[in-house]
């Protein structure tokens, strides 16, 4: 999978070289390229934003600069992901859909966001015929300073679902028992007793059917508690 990220803070993406995602790049499974939006400016101050038409607080990122940055990246079969707190909520099922794609672009907005004509332009029939899809995505109900951290969250969730990225694919199979993709029951490892707290007896029994039943019950209790 090819991933492009466009940002005024390329340094935010340094952690992408670590751990699973770093290894996935070394293995050639993921090719991440980070682009500095300011390199597409042509004025002395490297301006990327201006005041909003209609007035109001904050600044809007300029369509002209974004167009220059995105045009060369918008090849056939591209999903352009525009990060905004007003976007559709990111989820495990969305991660699975993006994991099957060949080319993702993360457009990291700052300030009050990107001039809406950028979204409109790349959603036009000309781009639709090239199988270009534009998505506005948010990672949750809170406001971040920009889309960089949200992009990292999405890239990590998406790339670990690409075949060959996880060292132990069984952890994916195990997760798939839950539609949201995570383990719901409490986990225990060695030692059998820690600070006076024992591991539940059932987990030491070797009775896999009973263990599965116990875990399902625990998962249910936990789900109720965390609603
Ligand atoms: Cl994608 N961007 C910003 N700025 N804030 C957010 C977000 C994105 N998702 C949740 N909060």
Image (tube, helix red, strand yellow):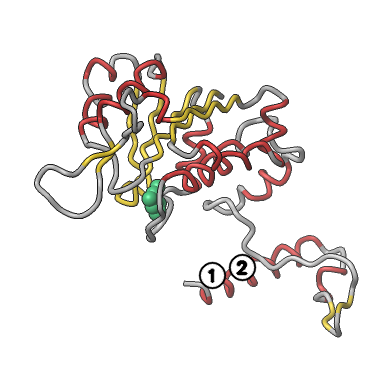
Of residues 171 and 34, the one drawn nearer to the viewer in this rendering: 34
In x, y percent, where is residue 118? Answer: 26, 30
Which one is nearer the viewer's eye here, 206 or 191? 191
Q: In the figure, 78 relative to 198: above or below?
A: above
Residues at discs 2 and 1 in contact (Cβ within 8 Å): yes
Q: Is residue 111 left or right of residue 102?
A: left
Looking at this view, is 5 or 200 the one in front? 5
Figure quadrant of residue 31: top right
Q: Mark 2 points at which residue?
A: 219
Number of residues whose C-alpha sits closer than 10 Å to that of mark 1, classed few (under 14), some (14–19) or many (20 or more): few
Query: In this rendering, would 94 be left or right of 41?
Result: right
Camera-nearest residue between 109 and 209: 109
Q: Disc 1 beta carbon < 8 A from ligand 1?
A: no
| Residue 154 location (% of width, % of height) | 51, 43
The location of residue 181, given as percent across then percent down, is 57, 50
Q: Residue pushed farthest front?
A: 44
Residue at (25%, 46%) from the top-left corner? 59
Report the quarter where the N terminus lies. top right
Question: What residue lies at 65% left-to-right and 25% top-to-bottom?
Answer: 29
Q: Is residue 28 above or below residue 88?
A: above
Q: Classify mark 1: helix, strand or loop.
A: helix
Residue drawn at x 25%, y 30% is 63
Residue sitting farthest toward the left: 54
Residue tagged by mark 1? 223
Q: Which residue is drawn at 42% across and 45% down?
A: 147
How far is the residue under mark 2 from the one under mark 1?
6 Å
Q: How many marks?
A: 2
């Amino acid at each position: 999978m090819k991933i492009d990220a466009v940002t005024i803070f390329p340094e935010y993406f340094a952690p992408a070289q670590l751990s699973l995602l770093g290894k996935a790049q070394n293995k050639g499974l993921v090719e991440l390229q980070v682009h500095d939006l300011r390199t597409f400016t042509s004025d002395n101050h490297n301006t990327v934003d201006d005041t909003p038409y209609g007035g109001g607080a904050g600044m809007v990122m300029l369509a002209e600069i974004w167009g220059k940055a995105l045009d060369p990246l918008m090849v056939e079969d591209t999903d352009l992901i525009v990060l905004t707190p007003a976007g559709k909520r990111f989820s495990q099922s969305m991660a699975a859909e993006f994991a099957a794609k060949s080319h993702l672009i993360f457009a990291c907005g700052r300030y009050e966001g990107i001039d809406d004509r950028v979204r409109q332009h790349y959603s036009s029939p000309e781009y639709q015929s090239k199988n270009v899809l534009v998505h506005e995505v948010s990672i949750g109900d809170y406001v971040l300073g920009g889309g960089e951290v949200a992009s990292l969250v999405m890239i990590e969730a998406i790339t670990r679902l690409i075949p060959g990225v996880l060292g132990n694919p069984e952890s994916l199979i195990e997760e798939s028992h839950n539609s949201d993709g995570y383990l719901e029951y409490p986990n225990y490892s060695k030692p059998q007793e820690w600070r006076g707290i024992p591991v539940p007896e059932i987990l030491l029994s070797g009775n896999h059917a009973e263990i599965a039943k116990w875990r399902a019950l625990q998962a249910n209790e936990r789900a109720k508690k965390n609603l």
